[in-house]
Image (tube, coloured by chain):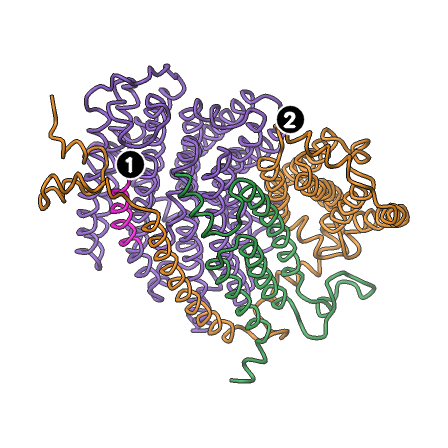
Chain colours: A purple, B orange, C green
């Protein structure tokens, strides 16, 4: 076995051991540096691995121990997993850079090490949720991700964040409870926990028509559980409070990455375990499509009514996750590929927006009401440009990542055989709605110069993060064909 | 350049201004903020929201109950030997656990070796929980810490509790160590043994005051124990995975259960005492 | 029908308990009771899991003098999974109790409704 195949497991262990050591490392600055360094290192490792796996054009199961598939834990990776892992780690690193100033202002210096533990653990759980080949490992790491993500909200210690955290925590626990119960039911009818064996048993049960009721229940509960955790439409109420009140880095990580981890797991479960035929047979994809549809529209409508910049961005995340679920709900490989692309595009765009708003707000004495941000871009032009690129990408202007995502959705709907009109309609409507709140916000921050604005100190870390994230958005918008080809190949090799 | 006021307000994110401006005269619009949302309005809105939330929740729950009951009835029968769960995996675990992992307790062998990565995740959950509790309750503020210390000094010590603790503590400690170190051959292991040891520490702290605990279990020792336990697990298992996946032959698999049991025991013990200590005093 | 119910009595109990916990966790305004409900919900899942491992007339999977004769022991996998699950639920309970303690210290209430009102009053 070539050494490169050890890279995913090494990157997971690197983040986890770093998290363990961070809890006793003295010094806030050192803790931050180590966290950012580890995520950068993981990004580089995943990128090397991605290059390697694309060259060899294969996917590989890696036994976590001495014992192969039905007996021991296993992770499995192909081009798609490599792509997700490198993007997740890179965006994590950039969010840490971009929110650095706010992070040091919002977090107690003595507790910085503990806060950094949470960032590392979130990264580790994201990696495992992407790589895992075992349903129960997925449950354990879902819980790690839940606890660490809730802690990310409350590291900014204030009354509203505590309340937002507990609401987030309870909603997430409902989700993980549903997921756990569905895994148990699945175990009860198949007797396996490892995904390859689960897939075989599910196929056999479906062919023999045994336990179909239980399988339908499992699929529905698993979808609902992961949906609750990734803010699928009727369960989205916790998101704006949690993402809106957290510190910049946390908001960027939560909105850009954490909710995506569960969506990636859902895609893995659909493609690897149940297969799309089973999903279609139980009409689960129709429900997912309907909820994604509602989320896209209602998320935008609620963002339209919001006057707080970060809460507006948070509601916009609900809408953007609606896109992901709509793609999954198309029930075709092309739809799922489009959803994967949307996950990537949003993972770059939303952190860019949050980091920019964080910088802009520091010109307005940390008041994040849109009214207070008026004209703030003039005191921090780079953040203004960053916000502009992010906003235009969200609206779906060509050359930006969001446009490419919408193109992929429409083409996958047109070449599919159902829901063509509905998909195109909701894409158009949601673009208009996005424009209705992003364009005013953009005009607002660039409108006449505010004489009372504080001078913003130049923050090289945030500048670098904004530039790189913006380049990512532009790259996805211009060169989306090769990325899409990679995703499609990755889904085939799942 | 002066923008029209209506447009400016829309840009600033005021709700529905441009839409309303088409139908309403400007004067009326100005009077809106004067009335303002009163407390009564807020209460009514909250009530309305909670009622809606109640209704939706109830509908979801009734649906869930119906679906779950239908699923539960359709499951394979309880305790039947021919169930799908009793397959080759079980046969392998029961048949080969002793030989492959050195554990007569098949469950210990399974969670610490076959599915050891899950258990590593689980130990990390415990570690994370302690970190979260520390984030929330750690009194970094001097005033809070002094208050807690004062409370503790003035609290009377219970003579009955102390006398009983002297009697019980050695037994609990022995029992805990016994459970911890015999995890591979009998019921028990790191998690149960660790909790018993943690309970012993808590009993000691309750009976003799945490000053007494601090003589040998300071914050430094707490951190050292916790980190040593987890790092031992991480390094041991990391090496084990590397060897296992790359097909390097080694005898590590036979010893891993004992060492990891010890590591988990350390983690669980310090976690339990950490919970108690942070809940009551906000520090160790 | 009755025989089906008796055959699956543990699964049915687990389903009812799960929904009890689920409902209360969603709808109960008291935060402490929400945490209790969460524990009920998880315990229901563990009951379900543990009942799946049972095989009539066999003993726990700790090899005794009988050696590794598979037909003597129950299924060890659910026991291990329940152990993992319990640890997770303990950790989550500890975390949420600490959160509630802090919230009580800040707002003086553990009732979700009063909490929302208190937050409104403070203009947060």
- Residue A464, quarter of picture: top left
Mark pair 2, 1: CA separation: 58 Å
- Residue A408, quarter of picture: top left
Residue occupied by mark 2 = B142
Left/right placement of residue C73 relative to residue A437 reads: right
> Along the line of sight, which residue is nearer the eye, B280 or B40?
B40
Q: Is residue A408 magenta?
A: no
Residue occupied by mark 1 = A482
Instruction: Answer yes or no: is residue A334 visible.
Output: no
Q: Residues within 10 Å of mark 2 (few under 14, many from 20)?
A: few
Residue C37 spot, x, y in % from top left: 55, 59
Where does the magenta region start and end?
A292-306
**Residue at image x 56%, y 21%?**
A30
Q: Residue under mark 2: which chain is it in?
A: B
> Along the line of sight, which residue is nearer the eye, A170 or B70?
A170
Q: Residues within 10 Å of mark 1 (few under 14, many from 20)?
A: few
> Which residue in the rendered view is the most extreme toward the bottom?
C2
> Along the line of sight, which residue is nearer the eye, A410 or C39?
C39
Prevailing secondary structure class for the magenta stretch in the rendered image: helix
Residue A438 spot, x, y in % from top left: 23, 36
Mark 1 element type? helix
Q: Is residue B137 above or below residue B108?
A: above
Left/right placement of residue C77 relative to residue A463 reads: right
Which label sits in the foreground, 2 or 1?
2
Residue C82 spot, x, y in % from top left: 63, 58
Q: Residue under mark 1: which chain is it in?
A: A
- Residue A475, quarter of picture: top left
**Residue at image x 53%, y 20%?**
A29
Residue A168 spot, x, y in % from top left: 46, 47
Q: Is residue A303 magenta?
A: yes
**Residue at image x 53%, y 70%?**
C16
């Amino acid at each position: 076995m070539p050494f490169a195949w050890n890279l995913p497991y090494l990157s997971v262990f690197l983040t986890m051991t770093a998290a363990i050591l961070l809890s006793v490392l003295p010094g806030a600055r050192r803790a931050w540096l180590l966290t950012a360094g580890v995520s950068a290192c993981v990004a580089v490792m995943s990128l090397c691995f991605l290059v390697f796996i694309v060259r060899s054009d294969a996917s590989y199961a890696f036994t976590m121990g001495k014992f192969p598939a039905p007996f021991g834990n296993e992770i499995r990776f192909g081009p798609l997993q490599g792509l997700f892992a490198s993007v997740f780690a890179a965006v994590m690193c950039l969010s840490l850079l971009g929110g650095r100033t706010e992070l040091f202002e919002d977090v107690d210096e003595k507790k910085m090490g503990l806060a950094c533990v949470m960032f590392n653990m979130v990264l580790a759980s994201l990696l495992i949720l992407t790589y895992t080949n075992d349903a129960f490992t997925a449950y354990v790491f879902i819980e790690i991700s839940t606890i660490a993500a809730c802690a990310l909200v409350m590291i900014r210690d204030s009354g509203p964040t505590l309340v937002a955290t507990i609401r987030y925590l309870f909603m997430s626990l409902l989700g993980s409870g549903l997921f756990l119960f569905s895994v148990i039911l699945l175990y009860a009818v198949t007797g396996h926990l490892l995904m390859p064996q689960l897939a075989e048993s599910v196929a056999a049960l479906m062919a023999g028509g045994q336990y179909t009721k239980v399988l339908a229940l499992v699929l529905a509960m698993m979808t609902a559980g992961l949906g609750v955790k990734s803010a699928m439409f009727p369960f989205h109420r916790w998101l704006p409070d949690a993402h809106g009140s957290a510190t910049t880095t946390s908001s960027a990580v939560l909105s850009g990455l954490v909710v995506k981890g569960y969506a990636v797991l859902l895609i893995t479960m659909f493609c690897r375990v149940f297969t799309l035929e089973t999903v279609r047979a139980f009409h689960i994809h129709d429900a997912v499509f309907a909820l994604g549809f509602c989320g896209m529209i209602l998320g935008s409508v609620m963002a339209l009514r919001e006057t707080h910049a970060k809460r507006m961005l948070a509601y916009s995340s609900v809408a953007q996750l609606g896109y992901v679920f709509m793609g999954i709900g198309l029930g075709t490989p092309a739809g799922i590929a489009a959803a994967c692309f949307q996950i990537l595009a949003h993972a770059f765009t939303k952190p860019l927006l949050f980091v920019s708003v964080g910088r802009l707000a520091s010109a307005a004495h940390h008041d994040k009401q849109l009214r207070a941000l008026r004209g703030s871009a003039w005191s921090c032009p780079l953040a203004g440009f960053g916000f502009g690129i992010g906003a235009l990408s969200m609206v779906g202007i060509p050359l930006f990542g969001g446009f490419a995502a919408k193109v992929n959705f429409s083409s996958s709907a047109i070449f599919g055989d159902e829901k063509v009109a509905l998909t195109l309609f909701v894409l158009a409507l949601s673009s208009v709605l996005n424009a209705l709140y992003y364009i005013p916000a953009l005009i607002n921050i660039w409108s006449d110069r505010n004489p009372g604005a504080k001078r913003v100190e130049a923050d090289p870390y945030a500048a670098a993060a904004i530039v790189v994230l913006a380049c990512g958005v532009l790259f996805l918008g211009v060169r989306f064909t090769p990325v899409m080809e990679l995703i499609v190949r990755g889904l085939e090799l799942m | 350049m002066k923008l029209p006021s209506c447009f400016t307000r829309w840009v600033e994110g005021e709700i529905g201004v441009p839409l309303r401006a088409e139908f309403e005269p400007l004067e009326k619009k100005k009077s809106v903020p004067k009335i303002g949302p009163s407390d009564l309005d807020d209460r009514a809105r909250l009530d309305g929201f909670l009622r809606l939330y109640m209704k939706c929740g109830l509908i979801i729950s009734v649906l869930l109950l119906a679906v779950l009951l239908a699923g539960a009835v359709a499951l394979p029968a309880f305790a039947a030997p021919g169930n799908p769960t009793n397959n080759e995996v079980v046969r392998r675990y029961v048949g080969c656990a002793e030989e492959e992992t050195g554990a007569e307790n098949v469950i210990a062998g399974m969670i610490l070796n076959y599915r050891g990565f899950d258990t590593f995740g689980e130990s990390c959950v415990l570690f994370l929980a302690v970190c979260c509790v520390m984030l929330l309750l750690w009194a970094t503020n001097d005033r809070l810490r002094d208050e807690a210390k004062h409370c503790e000094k003035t609290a009377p010590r219970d003579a009955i509790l102390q006398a009983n603790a002297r009697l019980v503590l050695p037994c609990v400690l022995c029992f805990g160590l016994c459970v911890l170190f015999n995890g591979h051959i009998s019921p028990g292991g790191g998690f149960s043994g660790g909790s018993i040891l943690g309970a012993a520490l808590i009993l000691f702290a309750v009976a003799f005051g945490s000053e007494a605990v601090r003589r040998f279990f300071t914050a430094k020792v707490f951190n050292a124990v916790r980190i040593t336990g987890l790092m031992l697990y991480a390094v041991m298992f990391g090496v084990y995975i590397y060897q296992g996946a790359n097909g390097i032959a080694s005898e590590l698999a036979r010893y891993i259960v004992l060492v990891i049991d010890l590591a988990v025991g350390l983690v669980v013990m310090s976690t339990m005492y950490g919970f108690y200590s942070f809940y009551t005093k906000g520090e160790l | 029908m009755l025989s089906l119910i008796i055959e699956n009595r543990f699964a049915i109990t687990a389903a009812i308990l799960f929904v009890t916990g689920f409902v209360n966790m969603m709808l109960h305004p008291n935060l402490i009771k929400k945490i209790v409900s969460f524990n009920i919900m998880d315990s229901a899942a563990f009951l379900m899991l543990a009942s799946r491992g049972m095989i009539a007339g066999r003993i726990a999977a700790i090899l005794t003098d009988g050696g590794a004769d598979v037909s003597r022991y129950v299924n060890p996998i659910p026991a291990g999974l329940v152990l993992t699950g319990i640890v997770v639920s303990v950790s989550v309970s500890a975390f949420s109790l600490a959160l509630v303690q802090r919230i009580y210290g800040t707002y003086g209430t553990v009732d979700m409704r009063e909490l929302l009102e208190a937050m409104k009053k403070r203009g947060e």
